[in-house]
Image (cartoon, rainbow, N blue to C red):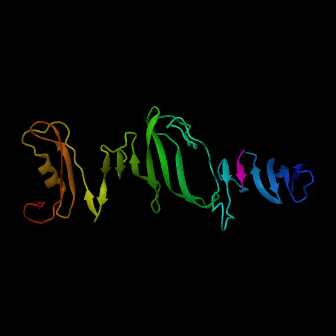
Amino acid sequence: SGDTLIGAISGVSNGHQIIVDSSNNQTYKWFNGGTNSMILDSSGKLGIGATSPFGQTQISDTDWSSGAPYGTVLTVTGNNTNDANWGHLMISDSSTGTGNGGMIRFATGSTSSDMNPFAGIDSFTEGSAYGGLKFLTRPNGGTATARMTILSDGSVGIGDTDPDYLLDMRGEIGDQAPLQRWTVTGTPSAGFNWVTEAMSTNLGQDKRIVHAFGKERSNGNSGTMSFVPRASSGDNAIA
């Protein structure tokens, strides 16, 4: 088989061994009670409970059925930190440029042939030592896409990866009515009514909720207006 015994526990005869598999590029295997419980392959990949590690380290335990540890595979325990910027588990990106950061993925499967990631959390830097988070899901037949973004200043975007407000939503909400936004930059001329223009140019009668943002034409001050049109005619109508 190419296996060479390089260590065994003295006085134990039930298969507690360390062997090297010379036929598999010097792969080291740890046996516990005759079961291959850990492997270190020639490329440096470590498998604990996994004989063909998917990444640099893979920990696998699929034998749990009931009672403690209730399906828990990995536990990280620490004590209080004296700096809120640090924690007990660090997930980092070796690239330090803006937009990079550690990533977490959620998946099914356990090997290179059946591993299927479908959701995740990405961190990203916005500058030196500050940044935000993106929450992603993977649509049928597609790739993971950011659905919610939290910037370093606390602004939250839903359907918007660069929110301008504490809560910034784009797309459809509620009863499929789209939440739309228009922004007028600069100071409009005295003859320009940004609310009327946005309403008449961009909306149809099937819309329900409108938030309009812009600058007041008389003095250039920023303004916000929200309305809920409900009728096809009268004061609440949209032409």
Screen quadrant of the N terminus: bottom right
Residue 35 occupies which quadrant of the picture?
A: bottom right
Q: Determine the image quadrant of residue 114.
A: bottom right
Q: Quick check: 225 left or right of 62?
A: left
Would residue 204 be seen by someone viewing this image from the given angle?
Answer: yes
Farthest residue, direction right: 11
Q: Is residue 41 magenta?
A: no
Q: How many marks?
A: 0
Q: Is residue 98 visible?
A: no
Q: Is residue 236 above or below residue 75?
A: below
Q: Main secondary structure of the magenta part?
A: strand
Query: Is 112 or 51 nearer to us in this picture?
Result: 51
Residue at screen point 9% across, 65% down: 233
Q: Of residues 40 and 152, which is closer to you in this image? A: 152
Residue 91 percent coordinates (x, y): 56, 43
47 in the magenta segment: yes
Q: Which residue is located at x 50 percent, y 41 percent?
A: 101
Residue reaching furthest top? 128
Indicate the position of residue 20 as horizontal and vertical percent values: 84, 49
Q: Residue at x 30, y 44 (%)?
A: 165
Is residue 114 rendered to the left or right of residue 160? right
- Name the quadrant of the C terminus: bottom left
Q: Residue at (20%, 39%) from the top-left corner?
A: 185
- Across and down, in percent, residue 115 comes to 60, 59
Residue stretch rendered in magenta on the structure: 44-48
